[in-house]
Image (cartoon, rainbow, N blue to C red):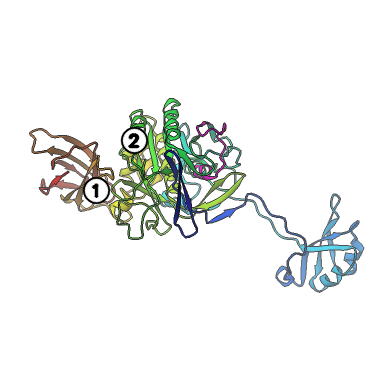
Amino acid sequence: MYTMAKNDSGGEDVKRKIGLSIALVALVVAFLVSGCVKAIEPNSAVVDWSLQAVDGQARVIIGFSGLPDKALVKAFGGEVYAEFGFIKALSAKIPVEAIDGLLRNPHVVYIEPNIELHALEEQPLWGMDRIFGDESFEFTTWGTSTGSGVNVAILDTGIDERHADLAGRVAGGEDFTGKGSYFDDNGHGTHVSGTVAAIYSNSIGVYGVAPSASLYAVKVLDATGSGYLDWIIAGIQWAIDNDIDIINMSLGTTSDVQSLEDACNAAYEADVLIVAAAGNSGNRPGNRDTVEYPGGYASVIAVAASDSNDARATFSSTGPDVELIAPGVSILSTIPGDGYAYYSGTSMASPHVAGVAALVLAANSDLSNADVRSILQQTAENLGLKQEHQGYGLVRADLAVQAASGTTPPASDTDPEPGTITVASIDYSLSRNAKHMYVSVQLDPVVGGASVSIEVYLNNGSSPYFVGTITTDTSGVAKFTVVNAPSGTYSTVVTDVTAAGYTWDGDFPQQTFVK
């Protein structure tokens, strides 16, 4: 088994054992947020009573060694508010200058501020706010869809189903690691699960993208965050056999293995949508093809990570297989033991997309996995990044649900004026394993949602080798995937472009590509 350990500087120590494993695509945890409050001993910190006082009077709780002495408090100019029968304390208002003297009394154990406590509320989550566009919590989109009735399998380290923010959300699962339980003994799977479907109506902690989706804990990674290839394949098979709609795999390997690709292809053919982390192997300029597998397979949506400034996270893998980008830096979510933690990684980006896919499918149950995938692509927001960094763009829950449910957003003042549209370029690229070819058609001006039809010819054949129609993303690009493209010379003919308010001029560049 290969296991992957990350040191504080981000370097990797790789230990080789027997067989092949798939390691977590996750960065080091930045901060932990405890699910409970740590006790603080009375008088353990110096209190600035001037900050607590109003008109020289401070509201306090006074603890006694025996029965509370109301007469003593009054003797120091205090006013008693309440006496508690089950603890040796009372509440009062006393002059600030009397506090030191009262503390010197041997019967007084402590004096502490009568602080205000507040109802716990959901923590604001920048990633959620970003993918829901201009909406704010509780999101308007949830009035149309919360993911109810959609089954999402989390192929990971398991899930802590006892977590208060995941209570009732885990509908089942299976363990393939030999542990005998799908309980999360690592933390990664529970964090991923919270991003997908944490409860939003319990006024604590965090909330998920699709808070009514049903989670399935498919444990394929052990306590160290690693798992054998056959564990992952068995997990995919389990998902197919148990009517799972969406698989999230926040895991990856640099090894391109046929069995894993075959398993992903079989799931996709069975109408399962597969979402996976793109990988954390990117460099600062993002000039290498580093997407890991299974994200690099054509049947899988590879998700890159963005930060709160809409920039690509420098660790996020890049390449033509990147399909979407989602928040993946300092993401707060659930961890075992009713805790919360900030994690960073494409592992955190992937469940944002899986959650949006659940919203889309719940909004329109007649959609196939290919339909859902197409909607995610068409409604993605162009962040102005390279295609190899963002794919179609940032996943948008609000726009995707609108497209799925048939609702439309208010008319925009920036709708393009009627005019002529042209095909500006036709570009070719290959998947990392060079099995699949991508044909990208760029329109000018940039128009999202335009329909583009093409025919791809191989070696000057008389009949097209590939025919397809797809809509453009928000960057005006229609990206076609020619699966298992054989070697040869390719040429592309654009047969139609349809865009509201535009007329296609009928022109397109004459370009060939040799594979």
Mark 1 neighbour class, 10 Å CA radius: few under 14, some 14 to 19, many 20 or more: many
Give the position of the C terminus as an image quadrant: top left
Observer-side mark, 1 or 2, equals: 2
Viewer-proximal residue among 449 and 125: 125
Where's residue 293, x and y in %?
36, 42
- Magenta region, residue range: 172-192
Marks 1/2: CA–CA distance: 27 Å
Kindly identify which residue carries mark 1: 477
Where's residue 12, x and y in %?
44, 54
The residue shown at (42%, 56%) is 307
The residue shown at (40%, 55%) is 315
Q: Name which residue type carries label 1.
A: Val
Please, is residue 447 above or below residue 403 in the view? below
Kindly identify which residue carries mark 2: 261
Quadrant in the rendering for residue 51: bottom right
Number of numbered discs overlaid on the protein picture: 2
Q: Name which residue type carries label 2.
A: Glu
Q: Seen in the image, is 218 located left or right of residue 502? A: right
Q: Earlier in the sequence, mark 1 or mark 2?
A: 2
